[in-house]
Amino acid sequence: MKKVQYSTLWLAYTGVLVALQIVLGNLVQIALLEKQMNLGFLPIAAAGYLFGPVSAIIVAGLGDVLGTLVFGTGAYFPGFTLTALVVGCVYGLFMYPRNQKWLTKAIGNHTSDIAVRALISAALAAVVYIFLNSYWLTFFVPKGYWVLLMGRLPFNLAEIPIFTVVILLTCLALDRLPPTMLPPTLKHGMPADAASEAKQ
């Protein structure tokens, strides 16, 4: 696997995605009974798709820390940052095309390939959120771990198909960016038909 080129393009994308993660993760909130749903996962998934695990981890970690410092109503808690880092690693490992060449070859269709990787990433991220964040909440909420987990479980599971579709649509939109705005690893990692579509 080729190393990510930490170029001006990488720096620009990472900075923009961190800013988007802060906004989408803190300002765009959908209140549910046991948790809040937001679109903070999307910039993390996009970073993973474009540049791989390192970028996704940076976007997730910085987004969580800076978002908490800027918009947080309470004290900073490192447990949620740990969750964000693990989720960033998940999205980076499974969304980055170079890491899943075997899956791409097995499926053969670019859109279906992204959809499967998005589903796997969203499902694994949901598992991380369910088990880790339920534990961190026991430090703030006077409820037992399993009570919190079971209360949050239906909502985390319901998010998986939503996250999958949103990630798929976003990645397909990223594919259609001009070649000069795509990282070399993504341009060379796309199948020939997808690469030609992106140039149109």
Image (cartoon, grey):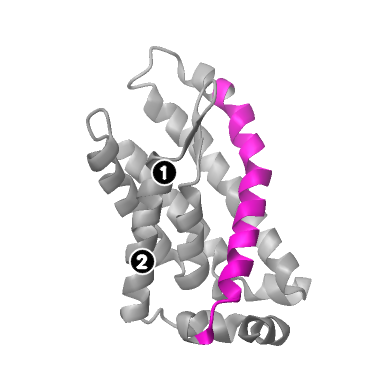
Residue 191 forms part of the magenta stretch: no
Q: Residue at x 23, y 41 (%)?
A: 69
On the image, the x and y values in percent for residue 62 come to 30, 53
Q: Decide: is 150 above or below 116.
A: above
Q: Which residue is mark 1?
A: 25
On residue 14, the disc is 2
On the image, the x and y values in percent for residue 178 come to 53, 82
Name the kind of residue labelled 1 in the image.
Answer: Gly
Q: Is residue 60 left or right of residue 46?
A: left
Name the kind of residue labelled 2 in the image.
Answer: Thr
Is residue 6 visible in the rendered structure shown here? Answer: no
Q: Is residue 147 left or right of residue 195?
A: left
Secondary structure under the numbered disc 1 in the rendered image: helix
On the image, the x and y values in percent for residue 190 come to 63, 81
Q: Decide: is 125 above or below 155.
A: below
Q: Decide: is 19 above or below 68.
A: below
Rendering quarter of residue 133: top left
Q: Which residues are magenta?
A: 151-179
Rendering quarter of residue 170: bottom right
